[in-house]
Amino acid sequence: MQSRSSSPVTELLLRWRSGDSDALQSLMPLVYAELHLLADAYLRRERSDHTLQSTALVHEAYLRLTGNALPEWHDRAHFFGIAAHLMRQILVEYARSRNAAKRGGRACRLTLGGAEDHFERPDADIVALDDALNDLSKIDPQQARVVELRFFAGLSIEDTAQALGISASSVKRDWNTARVWLFRELDRTAGA
């Protein structure tokens, strides 16, 4: 994903946030393909028999993005970070409802890969990962946000730094620390 604060996407996001409904109509063709790639990346990490399709994931994220309470868009990277967060929430909700329907059946599986310095643990449970990320956000919200932007949104170190308003070296440090913490937490919960 490219990051340009003066990109047409950023300009349309700001116009949309200001109440220009025409901006949303112009924005969607520009971001739809990238949202679809993001959804494809998420679903590639899921179990092979997952019933949710990438188009449905994009459309559900779109509905949530265009809901009543619009976030304060900063730029293109921020938009895709929010979209990634929404897609993660949708998949977690889907996994939780599937598990509830199966009364404790097999959880949806998520392969942790896809970011530049991706996690190397295959088939982590998306519900366990979400729980661990929520726990991490209570300890260090910035590290949790870095994981969300790097892993789920696929943002580069530089784009993540821009989206969070921190240095690239802080992103690298938080990314490495958070990965270690998440591995330990996922191992601990898997053994329980």
Image: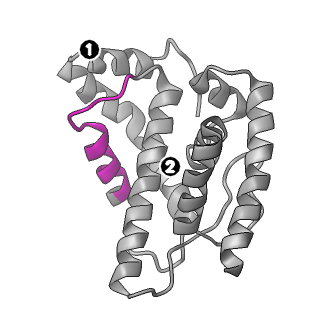
Q: Earlier in the sequence, mark 2 or mark 1?
A: 1
Report the side of 7 relative to 25 (left or right).
right
Q: Position of residue 88 (x, y in %)?
A: 47, 54
Q: Is residue 54 visible?
A: no
In the image, is residue 109 above or below residue 173? below
Q: Position of residue 122 (x, y in %)?
A: 71, 70
Query: Dot 2: what SS?
Result: helix
Residue drawn at x 62%, y 37% is 155
Q: Is residue 43 visible?
A: yes
Q: Callout 2, which amino acid?
A: Leu
Query: Is residue 58 found inside the magenta-colored segment of the image?
Result: yes
Query: Is residue 155 found inside the magenta-colored segment of the image?
Result: no
Q: Residues within 10 Å of mark 2 (few under 14, many from 20)?
A: some
Which contiguous range is marked in magenta? 57-72
For the N terminus, the image quarter is top right
Q: Position of residue 83 (x, y in %)?
A: 43, 41
User: Which residue is the site of mark 1?
Assistant: 18
Q: Nearer the viewer, mark 2 or mark 1?
A: 1
In the image, is residue 13 above or below residue 157? above
User: Which residue is the site of mark 2?
Assistant: 37
Q: In terms of depth relative to the viewer, which is nearer, 107 or 47? A: 107
Q: In terms of depth relative to the viewer, which is nearer, 149 or 128? A: 128
For the C terminus, the image quarter is bottom right
Mark 2 and mark 1: span between their CA atoms?
27 Å
Q: Callout 1, which amino acid?
A: Ser
Query: Dot 1: what SS?
Result: loop
Q: Residues within 10 Å of mark 1 (few under 14, many from 20)?
A: few
